[in-house]
Image (spheres, helix red, strand yellow):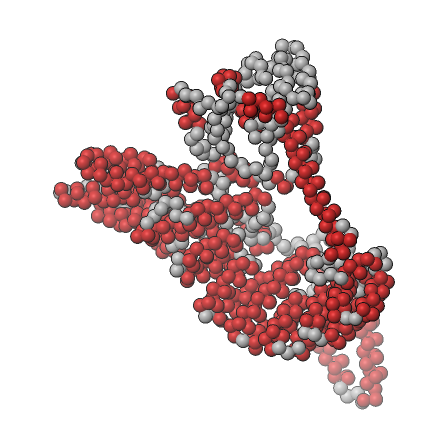
Amino acid sequence: MDGSLASAQPEESNTKPESPSSETVQSTADILQVLQKLQAQQSATPPTPQSTSFVPQREPQPTPVLAKEESQPTPVTAPEEPVSEWDALRASLRENPHDTEGWNKVVRLVEDSGDLERIKEAYESLLKMYPNTWSAQIAYLNHFLVPGHFKFAEDHLFTRFLRTSPAVELWKFYLTYIRRINVDPSTRDIVRKAYEFALNHVGQDKDSGEIWSDYIQFLRSGETNSTWEEQQKMDALRKVYHRAVQIPLENVETLWSELETFENNLNRITAKKFLSDLSPSYMQARAVLRQLQRHLGPLFPPPPPSTPSRPYLYLPPKPTFNAAERALVGAWKSYLRWEESNPLEIDEQDRNTFVTRVQGVYRKAVIRMRFFGEIWYMAYVWTNSIGKTEEAVNLLKAGIEANPMSFLLNFACAEALELQGNLEEVHKVFERFLEALRRDLDRTEVVPANASFTTQTDEKPPQNKELSEKRQEYGLAWTVYMRFARRAEGLKSARAVFAQARRDKWTPWEVYESAAIAEYHLTKDVRTPTRIFEKALETFSDEVDLIAHYLGFLLSVNDENNARALFERVIGTFPPDRARPLWERWARHEYQYGDLAAAQKLEKRMAEAYPNDPPIKRFAQRHTYHSTDAIAARDLGVAIVRQNSVTASYSGSSNSLGRTETQTSLLASGNTPQSTPAPTAPLVQHKRAPSPDHKRRDSDSHGPAQYKRARAASPPGRDRDRWDGHGGGRKRYNSPSWDRDRDRDAPLPLPPPPQAPQRRARENEEEKAVNIPSVISWFVGTLPGPSAFDGPVFRTDDLMQVFRGAVIPSATGRSRSPPPPAPRAGGGRPPPDYGPYQGPGGGRRRY
């Protein structure tokens, strides 16, 4: 390097004394010298430090040669390290935070690693996305309930989790921890206070029965040293028992039995009084428990299978609003309204108990249905109705944190804060909401991959329908923001908000229109709204709807000259298929307020634009007002044709249904032709006396009698006879003439026959309410509705005809006799079918 610097110095010393006239020659010589050196470097062997006096920094760089000889180790990819699974999962969850399976993978990964810092980071991130997820909270706590970490678990985890958690499992975990660290008899009061603290929060939950039982056992196990202490202990036990048996707990019947034993052991006389006073509340709790189980069955489907050591974390998925999710939302709404109706009939003096109960229910609902804004809004409305305004607003804020793009929650929160006078916070709500919508629009904006630049320049790419709809919704947010600014802070603030909207690239034309209409109604000045509309036309000149609204506004303010000028200016810029709304709007104005010559001239222009339109259509439109079109209704017969079509469709559907039901009844009741009531009849089963042949029917049919209500389920072997009973019941409402004559000549109906004790006991057992298992309820709730069926539809009467004519071989090898002939037109009962009958009756023949 010293040599190279020494060789460079003479060149500089030689250039300094040169005269200005020789600068061009000297610079050319320098260029030639540099070129010669470069050629020498390229043709020579790998250079040595002595042979390179020019640009010495490039001497020790033989990497280009190595790169040509060894092409595999590229400079960028060779030193890169593979991305770990932890980093890959974190990056994936940052892109898609609603990936529930990804969160479970992260938890499994950090659990296997045993790194407390990563465990803390993973669970904190998960609980930020899914707060109050009790299974994740318990798994998180388990890592710090070890010596040396108790203080962190108490001060940072338990205190934060228990404040708002309605989960009975978390409170059980907390009580277990309290009893674990307070084993000394002197700390029994701490444990007692912990139980009271837990029961005040979740004691109304039906799953808290275990906590009540543990608390009773804890009080029972206390030692006493005097009669007074024993009496205090019994009073405390009686008080807890009396509270528990009035709540619809899963073990309320067990607690009631324990209470009876407890009271009778103390004093039988006082026990009778206490139990008689509590019996109505206990019976009410039992009845409510059955209803509660039916409500909660579809709401908590069973979790997927998991290992006992690491249970699966249930995380609410992002809604897709399919049929199953809509059914689930409906079930939650029905349950919440039922809880609000006070089914336990709690007195007004115990209003705090009722409020605590419903609050716990809503907390569970917003955890389970975290991404459904409707549930959050119901919680807000109820909380606000009981006077807890601040807590209601906090519910809305928590809902917005879970659903930042929810129009329902953001608008409700803005109105609630506006009523409180917190205008600065309302501006922040709208700004955050608009920012979330902008990010969603940026994600939705997709440039087609097959876009071609060789097409004509005047053709525009097809619009993205989803993007267009979201852009209109984005404009609605700006419009509501301007309304708030106008009514809360005045017109100047609304104009400032509109100025912000104009600078936004996603603002649609609807925002301009709303601002223009607001300006006109507030200032009664036409010039400012007109300027706003013209400004919108500069940006949205291809929007027919905008021009139609602008045209309607000018006509509404009686500015006919500018309206005519606007119409003539834009009507030629659109093809006829898009310009029809403009033609129709201007034609209505000409028909109502113009002269006949102008109207006919306009019709001539429209006939040129739309040559397929009949002339009578224009003539009829010229003589209509609002929706009254007498020419179409009377002269063209549209009203009569519509009335006849409706009547024909109704009668046709009724006849079809009648035929179908008649043939179904024929099969169900031994080939006896009969009809059914109209399908629109109310589904009410009227009790009535049986027909005179009740003895034969009772001995011949296993179906329920007609004076009984239908059972919820029956054994499989009795299905056919059950349908026989229903078929026989239908012919009492709408039967043919021969059946009506027979019924008219029959004697009066007899009262219900006396029932044997065994049969009465069986019927009472059957009439009991059936509790469907939660798995079945969840499965039925996930099934799609009838409207989702898109398969082939068969005519039922044709299928029944095929089944009637089918020859089904019997078990004995003989063929079934053919179906009987149709009844004669003159009436009369058809002959019986004497063919072999293989059914539940075991060979009995049906008539």
For residue 137, above or below residue 437: above
Q: Residue at x 77, y 84 (%)?
A: 15
Q: Residue at x 69, y 44 (%)?
A: 646
Dividing the picture into quadrants, the one containing residue 57 is: bottom right
The residue located at (83%, 84%) in the rendering is 24
Position of residue 508 measured from the top left corner of the image (x, y, whole percent) = 66, 66
Q: Residue reaching furthest front?
A: 745
282 vs 693: above or below: below
Answer with left or right where residue 14 lies relative to residue 211.
right
In the foreground, 442 or 749: 749
Where's the N terminus, which quadrant? bottom right
Q: Is residue 745 left or right of residue 589?
A: left
Tally the marks.
Answer: 0
Res. 163 in view: yes
Q: In which image quadrant can residue 630 be found?
A: bottom right
**Residue at 60% in and 62% down:** 437
In the rendering, at what x and y percent does residue 385 appear? Answer: 42, 58
- Residue 733: quarter of image: top right
Residue 78: x and y in percent read: 66, 54
Residue 809 x/y as whole percent: 66, 14
Residue 102 drawn above or below residue 748: below
Q: Is residue 143 visible?
A: no
**In which quadrant of the rendered image does the C terminus lie?**
top right
Front residue (pair 323, 163):
323
| 402, 313: nearer the viewer | 402
